[in-house]
């Protein structure tokens, strides 16, 4: 079925890749929420995941490896009326861009960050990523990955991130619902999406995830930070999915605009003639 | 009249307060002031000093010879005593009697005198009082300045500072037979004191810059502080980024979204920004970046000056792309060049780099009439058919620019090589066309660049760029007074070299290139592009700016060999 967000660009992912599920879920979420392509900006870094914006008809800024978050933050700040999504792989967001990820948690910009977490570097052909399991074997790590995997959810919750969720690309409908919640959330929202890489990750396969994932039920209270932290530490035989933590707090845009007593910078415009005459007067 | 004051001490003794006080008081008393700061990268101890030169006519450079040397510690005396002019004054409980060969040696113990007011921390203001006494200035402007800067600290502190000022003055009065200032001026409130960082900040504000992101790094931090202090009035989003990589990527994001955006740093931070610079070039996003140079490589000398980054910023980031590189010669030009930088960054959709340095950043200049000649242009968003091609291959290389969310166009920007729509491509024929499109801009950009400031001289031509303009001019005037006809060619817009540059260089007298670096980076650029030799070079890389007398000596040395 045709979709407003359909793009003509040929998709370069391997057949069966988990990225397809994320693409479908995101397009579905945007459509169901009633957005039009002009009001959406997709910002990405570099990697297999980072190609996704090209496969959606919207505004796109496909920037540098690791640097999607600073760009997304600035776009949203300049034009808060846009829906801004930063989207990339686990290597891009948690490795090369780890510092920006940390500081986005502190700032709370009103953007949604979707991480395609395949626990591997896909585009560069299979090296360990920040979320690869200890012992993960690759050409670059023939003796197995020596480091422990990063737990992005615990990290985000410990820093009081505003909205923290986990999805699974193998369940497009549920993933779409989580994305819709994140997109309508006011403040920073993180969705770490378990995404099988069928070519380079022979450990964390579709079957591997399927056996382990389960959804948090209605009795789960995502407002309780300590409980959320506990939940986020669950990994192994059972892996929880859904919104794990949420806490509403003022956004970066709210705070900065109240400081400078402006709103929606780009719509204010600049009176260049006035600036010029100011310049003439200022120093005489 | 042309007098030069030097006050030194260790960090924490308030040398910078002295500099601010003397510059402002002298300026408000109607004099043109030129001051420089020399300090170490530390909060306490070490040696720091300020030089405040003032005159009844405009000033552009710092001098070596000193009329009054005020020493808040012994080290100041040992380091600078040879610079005191014949007939000059030395103040401070320093040296010993045998060394008191100066005509006016007043062994004032500033700290002791300050203790009389209640605390030795007032020693710096005692020194200011003593200097004003020798100069013969009344304390009216000084009082009002002290009221302004210490108001926050309360009535008592203001009073004590005023007392300290008077004690200092009273100590010297018996020794002053005729005050140093012969020509008294009426206070001229329209004189304005401005340093390079403030000027760059003004440039951004007057350009309509709406987004400024930066990571603190000396000597660029003053720009961040300045823009923050005016953010509300001018409606600028200012964000201290987590690192320089974030700073430049934020600025690029803001510019993509339609705001005029700038970032600033020093060489080390610019290294981190290199990939971002390429991103601005590849996505054809307008961007203004200031590099306030300091000596390197690596951390180098944080608080000292250098012109060592010219070759770096011309080439920074991998592969090739056009960019402008400007270097203002003084604060007035800094304001104008930033406005021009924003206009040109937008017109050509390229990065513009502005090279400042610690000397320009921290030196205070006085203006009677500061001219802001450049007019900030409102961005032109031309019309285009849909679907929108962000990277339409055009004869000029510049494609119509649209802003996301402000119309029907979907704006697709990509750091990968891309097609006209902005989608990534591996079509190598397209790659060739896209690369040519970007590089083509350089031809028109060259026409845009203004020729260097030029005055002919029959005997030799001093060539420089950026902050060395003032000292080169003054050295040239002194040479003239000695019968040597010295001309000048001074670049403020360096790269790309302007179109008629070859013509200009086809008839210059003996060229001598003066630079604050080791390799002679402008000289190298000129040699490469003009295919002419520039063997006569004066290079200094000790972290300090050229002083007029020093440069004069060096030029004469070259003259002997040349
Ligand atoms: C500065 C820089 N360093 C390295 C690379 C090479 N590189 C491209 S993608 C990538 C890792 C991709 O892994 P991830 O972000 O997890 O994305 P995936 O391909 O797995 O979706 C690397 C190392 C690059 N493009 N830029
Ligand atoms: S390499 Fe892995 S992540 Fe990349 S497209 Fe193929 S399956 Fe997907
Ligand atoms: Mg990955």
Image: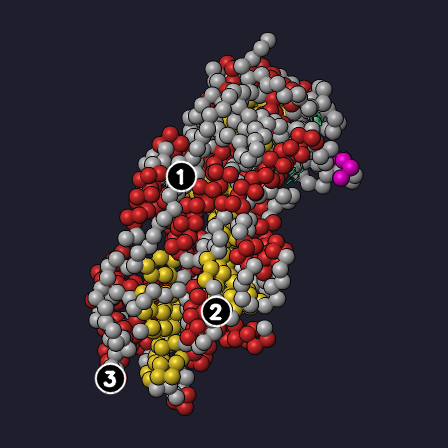
In front: A145, or A56? A56
Residue A126 falls within the magenta-colored stretch = no
Task: Give the camera-side residue of B245 and A17.
Answer: B245
Query: Is the stretch drawn in magenta largely helix, strand or loop?
Result: loop
Residue hosting label 2: B486
* Residue ID at (33%, 42%): A275
Residue at 50%, 69% (x, y): give it.
Answer: B458
Q: Residue at x 58, y 30 (%)?
A: B393
CB within 8 Å, label 1 to label 3:
no
N-terminal of the pair, mark 1 or mark 2, is 1
Q: Residue furthest top?
A: A1
Query: Crowding at label 1, few (<14), some or many (≥20) Cα neighbours within 10 Å?
Result: some
Q: Is residue B423 left or right of residue B475?
A: right
Residue at 57% x, 33% y is B395
Secondary structure of the residue carrying numbered label 1: loop
Q: Is residue A113 above or below residue B476?
A: above
**Real-space Cα separation, disc 1 to disc 2, in angstroms:** 38 Å
- Magenta-highlighted residues: A135-141
Chain holding disc 2? B
- Give the numbered dot on residue B377: 1
Instruction: Describe the element under mark 3 as helix, strand or loop.
Output: loop
Query: Which residue carries the number 3 mark?
Result: B177
Query: Does residue B168 sit above or below B417 in this rendering?
Result: below
């Amino acid at each position: 079925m045709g979709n407003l967000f359909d793009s003509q660009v040929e998709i370069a992912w391997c057949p069966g890749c988990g990225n397809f599920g994320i693409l479908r879920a995101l397009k579905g979420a945007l459509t169901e929420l009633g957005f039009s392509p002009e009001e959406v900006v997709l910002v990405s870094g570099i990697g297999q995941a980072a190609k996704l914006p090209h496969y959606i008809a919207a505004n796109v800024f496909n920037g540098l490896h690791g640097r999607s978050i600073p760009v997304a933050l600035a776009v949203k700040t300049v034009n808060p009326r846009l829906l801004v999504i930063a989207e990339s792989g686990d290597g891009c967001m948690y490795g090369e861009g780890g510092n920006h990820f940390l500081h986005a948690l502190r700032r709370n910009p009103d953007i949604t960050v979707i991480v395609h977490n395949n626990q591997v570097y896909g585009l560069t052909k299979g090296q360990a990523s920040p979320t690869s399991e200890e012992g993960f074997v690759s050409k670059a790590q023939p003796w197995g990955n020596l480091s422990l995997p990063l737990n992005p959810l615990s990290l985000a919750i410990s820093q009081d991130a505003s909205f923290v969720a986990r999805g699974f690309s193998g369940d497009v409908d549920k993933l779409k619902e989580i994305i819709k919640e994140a997109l309508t959330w006011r403040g920073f929202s993180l969705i770490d999406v378990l995404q099988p890489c069928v070519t380079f990750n022979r450990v964390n396969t579709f079957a591997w995830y399927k056996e382990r994932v389960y959804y948090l039920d209605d009795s789960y209270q995502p407002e309780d930070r300590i409980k959320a932290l506990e939940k986020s530490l669950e990994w192994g035989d059972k892996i929880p999915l859904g919104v794990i933590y949420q806490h509403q707090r003022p956004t970066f845009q709210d705070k900065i605009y109240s400081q400078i007593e402006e709103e929606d910078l780009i719509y204010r415009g600049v009176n260049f003639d006035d600036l010029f005459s100011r310049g003439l007067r200022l120093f005489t | 009249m042309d007098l030069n004051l030097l006050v030194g001490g260790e960090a924490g003794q308030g040398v910078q307060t002295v500099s601010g006080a003397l510059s402002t008081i002298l300026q408000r008393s109607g004099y043109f002031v030129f001051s420089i700061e020399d300090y170490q990268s530390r909060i306490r101890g070490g040696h720091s000093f300020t030089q405040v030169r003032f005159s009844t006519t405009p000033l552009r450079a710092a001098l070596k010879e000193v009329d009054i040397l005020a020493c808040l510690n012994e080290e100041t005396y040992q380091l600078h005593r040879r610079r005191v002019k014949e007939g000059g004054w030395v103040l401070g409980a320093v040296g010993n009697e045998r060394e008191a060969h100066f005509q006016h040696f007043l062994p004032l113990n500033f700290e002791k005198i300050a203790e009389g007011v209640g605390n030795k921390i007032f020693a710096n203001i005692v020194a200011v009082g003593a200097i004003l006494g020798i100069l013969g200035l009344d304390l009216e402007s000084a009082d009002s300045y002290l009221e302004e800067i210490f108001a926050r600290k309360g009535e008592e502190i203001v009073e004590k500072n005023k007392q300290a000022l008077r004690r200092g003055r009273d100590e010297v009065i018996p020794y002053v037979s005729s005050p140093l200032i012969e020509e008294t001026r009426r206070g001229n409130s329209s004189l304005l004191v401005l340093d390079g960082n403030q000027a760059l900040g003004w440039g951004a504000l007057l350009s309509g810059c709406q987004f400024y992101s930066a990571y603190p790094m000396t000597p660029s931090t003053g720009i961040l502080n300045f823009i923050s202090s005016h953010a509300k009035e001018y409606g600028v989003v200012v964000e201290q980024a987590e690192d320089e990589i974030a700073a430049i990527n934020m600025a690029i994001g803001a510019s993509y979204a339609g705001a005029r955006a700038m970032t600033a740093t020093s060489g080390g931070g610019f290294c981190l920004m290199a990939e971002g610079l390429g991103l601005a070039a590849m996505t054809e996003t307008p961007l203004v970046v200031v590099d306030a140079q300091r000596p390197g490589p690596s951390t180098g000398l944080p608080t000292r000056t250098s012109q060592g980054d010219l070759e770096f910023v011309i080439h920074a980031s991998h592969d090739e792309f056009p960019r402008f590189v400007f270097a203002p010669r003084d604060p007035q030009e800094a304001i104008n060049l930033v406005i021009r930088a924003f206009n040109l960054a937008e017109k050509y959709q390229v990065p513009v780099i502005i090279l400042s340095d610690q000397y320009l950043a921290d030196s205070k200049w006085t203006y009677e009439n500061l001219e802001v000649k450049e007019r900030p242009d409102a961005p032109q968003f031309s019309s285009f058919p849909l679907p929108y091609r962000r990277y339409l291959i055009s004869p000029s290389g510049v494609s119509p620019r649209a802003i996301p969310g402000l119309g029907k166009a979907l704006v697709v920007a990509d750091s990968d090589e891309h097609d006209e729509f902005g989608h990534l491509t591996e079509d190598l024929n397209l790659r060739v066309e896209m690369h040519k499109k970007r590089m083509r801009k350089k031809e028109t950009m060259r026409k845009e660049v203004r020729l260097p400031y030029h005055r002919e001289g029959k005997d030799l031509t001093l060539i420089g760029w950026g902050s060395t303009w003032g000292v080169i001019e003054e050295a040239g005037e002194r040479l003239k007074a000695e019968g040597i006809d010295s001309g000048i060619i001074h670049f403020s817009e360096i790269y790309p070299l302007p179109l008629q540059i070859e013509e200009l260089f086809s008839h210059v007298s003996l060229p001598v290139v003066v630079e604050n670096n080791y390799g002679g980076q402008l000289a190298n650029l000129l040699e490469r592009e003009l295919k002419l030799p520039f063997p006569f070079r004066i290079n200094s890389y000790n972290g300090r700016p050229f002083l007029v007398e020093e440069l004069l000596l060096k030029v004469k040395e070259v003259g002997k060999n040349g």
